[in-house]
Image: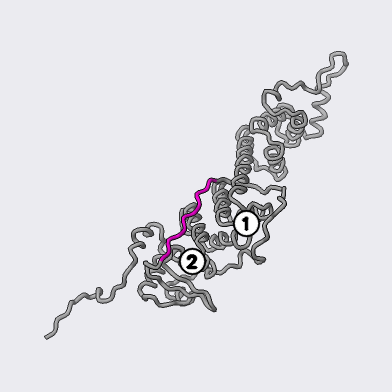
Amino acid sequence: MGFCLNAGEWNSVFAVPTSVVDKYIKLAGEKPLKLLLYLLRHGGETFSEDKLKSELGFADAGELEDAAKFWIQRGIIDCRDDNESVLTARREEQTAAPKAPEQLTLDGSAPSPAKPASAPAKAKARSPFAVSSGEIARRIKEDGDIRSLFNEVESIYGRPLRQSENVMVISLVDYYGLPAAVALLLISCCNRLGKTNSGYIYAAAQDWSDNGINSVELADAKIRSIEKINSTEQKIRKEFDIQNSFTQKQRELIKVWTEQWNFSEEMIILACGKTIDQLGKWNVNYTNRILENWKNDNISTVEAANSEKQSSKKDESSSFDVDDVMNRIIQKRYGG
């Protein structure tokens, strides 16, 4: 007579890394967990992407890539991309600890026209959209800076990245030539401005690349300038209850006032107020003329601007009102 344990379903079990529960159970979504369980069940076997999509029911574009990258980034899953992409689960003790990213401060914005003497050479002359999921996975696995970049971007977004976002992040480094720390500053800056769509981020990356923003110091200076412009725009909008979006010309002139002429918010608001007093509405060209006159006269404080003598005074000996004539000329020129 022989004896054995009647374990039922427990006769066939597989191990799950403790880190999956301890660290990632809240962050990992349904699809990453589904993928990992399948790979763990098959203990080190390797599967093609097509096989996994079929077995797991991943029909939508990017579903498998998004699920796989979550674990690849954390060293739980390996990816090999030869003639076909393949995935396999790793042993937990083999995972490499991600390199701690540099701690940085930030906020972001619009393109600057001036191009420095030494702009960096473009990285790879190819479309930023032509990056395979296998290549992204390999870069995350092999490069500690890239791994840290993806970790931090996920932290900023508060969720695993979509495949299009994965491509966007790697493109900032591989296509636009930005160092990982600078790419992180750019994404953080755009996120704080509420500009998280990839089109805006690509445009900003092109501007930074063209203008040689290739170090943390230069990026930080760029962001401070962006913050000033953005703050000024918001102040004008709030102060004068402007509901419509600024036009490209208005944005360009506000940028000139803040960046090139170095006027404070208070001076710009004062000039806008004088414009409305004179015209009955805000006109960016008239405000620009006021600020240009102040710049030429070296007037840089509110006190100096308020005490400035008006160039046109009522001529008491004249039979007509000079101010009235000037007002009518202004109305005609700037649209009353």
The picture places residue 170, in percent across and down from the top left corner, at 56, 62
Secondary structure found at label 1: helix
Residue 285, numbered label: none
Sequence order check, earlier mark of 2 and 1: 2
The residue indicated by pointer 2 is 141
Neighbour tally class for label 2: few under 14, some 14-19, many 20 plus, Cα within 10 Å: many
Q: Residue at x 43, y 64 (%)?
A: 96
> Does residue 217 lie above or below 314 as drawn?
below
Residue 321 is left or right of residue 83, and the answer is: right
The picture places residue 278, in percent across and down from the top left corner, at 74, 27
Residue 91 is left or right of residue 241, and the answer is: left
Q: Nearer the viewer, mark 2 or mark 1?
A: 2
Query: In whole angstroms, how far apart are the C-alphas of marks 2 and 1?
Result: 24 Å
> Which of the 4 image quarters holds residue 229?
top right
Residue 202, numbered label: 1
> Which of the 4 image quarters holds residue 209?
bottom right
Question: What residue occupies the far left of the structure in this picture?
Answer: 1
Residue 289 is left or right of residue 218, and the answer is: right
The picture places residue 164, in percent across and down from the top left corner, at 55, 62
Residue 58 drawn in magenta? no
> Does residue 118 lie above or below 235 as drawn?
below
Q: Amino acid at mark 2?
A: Lys
Q: Amino acid at mark 1?
A: Tyr
Question: What residue occupies the far top of the structure in this picture?
Answer: 317
Residue closer to the observer: 80 or 330: 80
Neighbour tally class for label 1: few under 14, some 14-19, many 20 plus, Cα within 10 Å: some
Residue closer to the observer: 64 or 333: 64
The picture places residue 303, in percent across and down from the top left corner, at 67, 23
Query: What stretch of residues is rendered in magenta?
Result: 95-105
